[in-house]
Image (tube, helix red, strand yellow):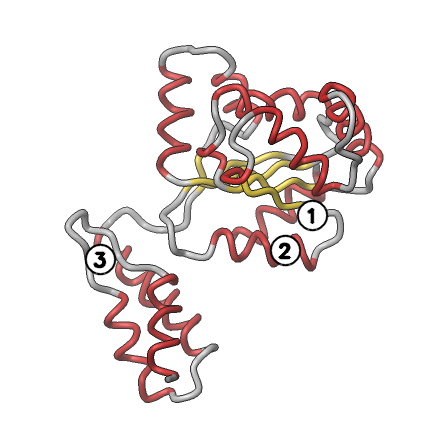
Amino acid sequence: TIREDILFCRKHAKSMIFVDNCGIGKTFTAKYLAKTERNTFYIDCTQCRKKNAFIKALARVVGVETKGKYDDIKDETKYYLTILPSPVIIVDEAGALDKEALGLLQEYWNATENRCGWYVMGGNALRSKISRGVSHDKDYFAELYSRLSEKFSRVVPLEKSQKINFYRRLITDVVSANIKDKSNLKEIVNRCLVLDENGNVSGLRRAESLLILYSE
């Protein structure tokens, strides 16, 4: 789903926002696509939470010089994204951005409209931040949400039994591709499907730890 969304955004210069549970492989998928697909750029917002840091981080991932005035760096980045053939920016962990940095997304989108795709990813923090801003008509939030297609996409079902089935298939597929002794597959999957006190299922990070444990 993430791959289809990102390639759609790149091909048609559109924007989407994907908000879902942690531990389902969002970041892994995004990083893989950035490495394997042409003009697909990945930025981790936990490493550039504030405005100026975000400006430099985005410039760096697309290959723009980061020395000089911040306005000049922004302008060069915007220009570069308009001349590249079908670029897409994957903005991961966008909920980590502070208000000013998040507002930059609207500025960059406006400058690259119909020339660059944007795929914004995050968790509940991002959903809450944008939803709260839209409902209170604060600052730029309604405009930003509109530019991101006005929809939070997700793949994990909300209904409990459907959610369990989703995770069972996800974890089974990933573990079976990464384990030598298939006799341990069922046990690893079952250990990952334990619900916590909030009804959340352990995701792929627990599966990764268990794979290491069972391989020793």
> Looking at the image, which residue sits at the far front?
67
Q: Which mark sits nearer the N-terminus, 1 or 3?
A: 1
In this rendering, position of residue 120 left or right of residue 200: right
How many numbered dots are placed on residues in this image? 3
Residue 99 locus on image (x, y percent): 48, 20
Instruction: Please state, as top left, top right, bottom left or bottom right, where the C terminus lies in the image.
Output: bottom left
Callout 3 amino acid: Ser
Q: Residue at x 55, y 24 (%)?
A: 101
Question: Mark 2 and 1 residues: CB-CB less than 8 Å, in contact?
Answer: yes
Q: Secondary structure at mark 3?
A: helix
Residue 161 numbered tag: 3
The CA distance from mark 1 to mark 3 is: 35 Å
- Labels 1, 3: front one: 1
- Labels 2, 3: front one: 2
Q: Is residue 145 above or below residue 137?
A: below
The CA distance from mark 2 to mark 3 is: 31 Å
Q: Secondary structure at mark 1?
A: strand
Q: Residues within 10 Å of mark 2 (few under 14, many from 20)?
A: many
Q: Which residue is mark 2?
A: 33
Q: Which residue is mark 1?
A: 40
Q: Residue at x 18, y 47 (%)?
A: 198
